[in-house]
Amino acid sequence: MERIALFPGSFDPFTKGHLDIVMRSISLFDKVIIGIGKNSNKSRYFPLEFIETKIKGVFKDFPQVSVESYEGFTADFAKRRDAKFIIRGLRNTTDFEYECGIAQANKFLWNEMETIFLITSPELAALSSSIIRDLHRYGAKADHFLPYELDYPTK
């Protein structure tokens, strides 16, 4: 039986911290799906299509990694893809407290699913998408924190 994991998030943008989690997950699972969730409560800074294209480019040489966008409950999307594992990266205890509640809700929605927490590599722990958005928004170059060139105009 194929072990499929889903790494869900808004990835606005997809950072080197996210890349670290995916690369470490490849050795644990047969297939990793990067699921870009459409959250109706959040307004995206970077367009979904732009980020999806960038992430696909990063993993073009990794056939075991796919990239898809989805709406609705993460647990429902995982179930449709037969992904019985959710991967989440943790930078600190605040992340753990937040992610623990989400993991419990996902388990309630689909009892067969397990959430796997991976601790972010220390050199990437201070990195967040919101910091990168702010750097970009105010004209600072943020490419150092991303696994691709950020060739998107500032807003």
Image (cartoon, rainbow, N blue to C red):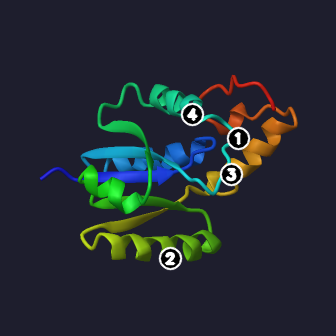
Residue 109 showing in the rendered view: yes
**Foreground mark, 1 or 3?**
1
Residue beneath disc 1: 45
**Foreground mark, 3 or 4?**
4
**Foreground mark, 2 or 3?**
2
- Residue sitting at x 68%, y 52%: 128
Q: CA distance from mark 2 to mark 1?
A: 26 Å
Residue beneath disc 3: 127
Quick one: label 2 or label 4, which is nearer the N terminus?
Answer: 4
Q: Tell me the crowding category of disc 2: few under 14, some 14 to 19, or many 20 or more residues within 10 angstroms, Cα based.
A: few
Q: CA distance from mark 3 to mark 4?
A: 18 Å
Q: Tell me the crowding category of disc 1: few under 14, some 14 to 19, or many 20 or more residues within 10 angstroms, Cα based.
A: some
Residue 28 showing in the rendered view: no
Residue 8 locus on image (x, y percent): 46, 52
What numbered label is drawn on residue 51?
A: 4
Q: CA distance from mark 2 to mark 4?
A: 27 Å
Which quarter of the rendering shows the C terminus?
Answer: top right
> In the displayed structure, does residue 145 sit left or right of residue 114?
right
Query: From the viewer's perspective, is residue 48 above or below residue 33?
Result: above
